[in-house]
């Protein structure tokens, strides 16, 4: 199938299949799955600026549906989400501007590719370490008998963050965070927003851990609030990148047909796993995305 | 337990088959017609294209979610 906006010829079945797999992971892990969608698009030969913009558009559709669900279930900290929205938009625009800057030097593929690989490896290593330590330390079997999930291994870090008193201090009742500096929230939002604008997708792979480990938001609320933030970053990012000529909406629409079914299946799979086990299962997944980018950059081979 | 799993798998296979027909029709009818128009819009009216892209992806997500949820519910009730 021809996609004239990006000037590519890609099989719609391949795109729907990528969407389907990403949808399963998104529904299962509560993150958008851009760590696979981006690399999956890149190896078709799509230029990286289109990968970033189109992935943002694709993730927007999914996040609207998912965040609506979490809103209904009361898993979104609206106050935190609204405070973060400003920082998310600033970060997303900064990321989009960085792509524009690199476009001038025809360096988008290499620079974004390398940053993508580094981020994916770091996330994978961190998630594996954290979930492994959590499982080992907290006697998961005992806690499971009591119907509770294990506390995260790096719990003490957010307590240190909350001791940082720089006015204005914010009380997040919904998340059970009594006193946290506005600036810490803003930094988290800007950093995650920047990665969304620069690497595409919702950056849930970064924002979710930051919400849990840095701000101290409970995992359930972090997933809902992250999705709310993904709607903000993906909406703004889609608009900004589309204006800059980086979005092939036809590709995003085709991917979404597969993602809709995948998400339904992924949500059902969550009934069988929870807590640290989910995080441990999540840990090798970013490496698949990193391997795809390495393959694309090293060989220039395209899979269509 | 095994019987329930078999039923669930059967329902899932039917769901996928029906959904594949829908998606194929969608590729040929909707996307084929939209393609040319979106291409010209992107080339000539970038700001309008950006807004249309946003509305299209959001609208399709909501519609697809409703369709797949309805389809899954309907087929599961039939299989049981």
Image (cartoon, coloured by chain):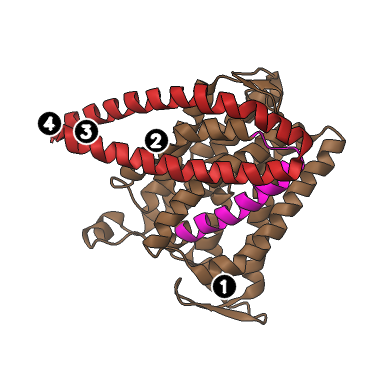
The mark found on residue A160 in the picture is: 1
| Chain letter for the residue marked with disc 1 in the picture | A
Question: What residue did someone put label 4 on?
Answer: B3
Q: Secondary structure at mark 2?
A: helix
Chain A, which colour? brown
Percent across and percent down for residue A87 are: 67, 63
Magenta segment range?
A: A224-248
Answer whether residue A234 is magenta in the image: yes
Question: Chain B: what color?
Answer: red
- Circles 1 and 4, Cβ within 8 Å, touching? The answer is no
Mark 1–mark 2 CB contact (< 8 Å): no
User: Where is residue A298 shown, x and y percent of the image?
Assistant: 70, 22
Give the number of the disc on residue B8: 3
Above or below A72: residue A31: above
Q: Is residue A62 left or right of residue B7?
A: right
Q: Nearer the viewer, mark 1 or mark 3?
A: 3
């Amino acid at each position: 199938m021809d996609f004239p906006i990006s000037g590519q010829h890609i099989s719609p079945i391949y795109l729907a299949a990528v969407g389907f797999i990403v949808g399963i992971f998104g529904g299962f892990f509560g993150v958008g799955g851009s760590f696979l969608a981006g690399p999956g698009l890149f190896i078709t030969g799509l230029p990286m600026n289109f990968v970033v913009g189109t992935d943002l558009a694709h993730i927007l559709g999914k996040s609207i549906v998912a965040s609506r669900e979490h809103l209904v279930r009361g898993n979104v900290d609206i106050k935190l989400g609204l405070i973060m929205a400003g920082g998310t938009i600033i970060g997303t625009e900064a990321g989009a501007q960085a792509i524009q800057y690199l476009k001038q030097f025809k360096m988008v593929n290499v620079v974004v590719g390398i940053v993508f690989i580094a981020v994916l490896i770091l996330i994978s290593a961190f998630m594996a370490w954290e979930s492994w330590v959590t499982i080992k330390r907290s006697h998961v079997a005992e806690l499971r008998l009591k119907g509770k999930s294990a506390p995260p291994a790096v719990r003490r870090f957010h307590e240190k963050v909350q001791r940082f008193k720089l006015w204005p201090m914010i009380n997040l009742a919904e998340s059970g965070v009594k006193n946290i500096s506005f600036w810490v929230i803003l930094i988290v939002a800007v950093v995650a927003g920047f990665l969304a604008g620069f690497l595409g997708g919702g950056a849930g792979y970064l924002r979710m851990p930051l919400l849990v480990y840095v701000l101290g938001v409970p995992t359930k609320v972090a997933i809902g609030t992250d999705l709310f933030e993904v709607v903000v970053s993906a909406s703004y990012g889609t608009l900004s990148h589309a204006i800059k000529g980086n979005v092939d909406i036809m590709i995003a629409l085709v991917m979404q047909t597969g993602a809709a079914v995948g998400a339904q299946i992924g949500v059902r799979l969550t009934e069988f796993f929870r807590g640290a086990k989910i995080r441990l299962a999540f840990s090798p997944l970013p490496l698949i995305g990193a391997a795809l980018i390495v393959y694309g950059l090293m060989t220039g081979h395209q899979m269509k | 337990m095994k019987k329930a799993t078999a039923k669930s798998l059967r329902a899932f296979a039917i769901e996928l088959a029906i959904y594949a027909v829908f998606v194929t029709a969608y590729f040929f009818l909707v996307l084929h017609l939209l393609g040319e128009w979106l291409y010209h819009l992107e080339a000539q009216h970038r700001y309008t294209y950006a807004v249309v892209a946003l509305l299209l992806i959001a609208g399709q997500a909501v519609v697809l979610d409703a369709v797949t949820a309805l389809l899954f519910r309907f087929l599961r009730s039939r299989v049981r």
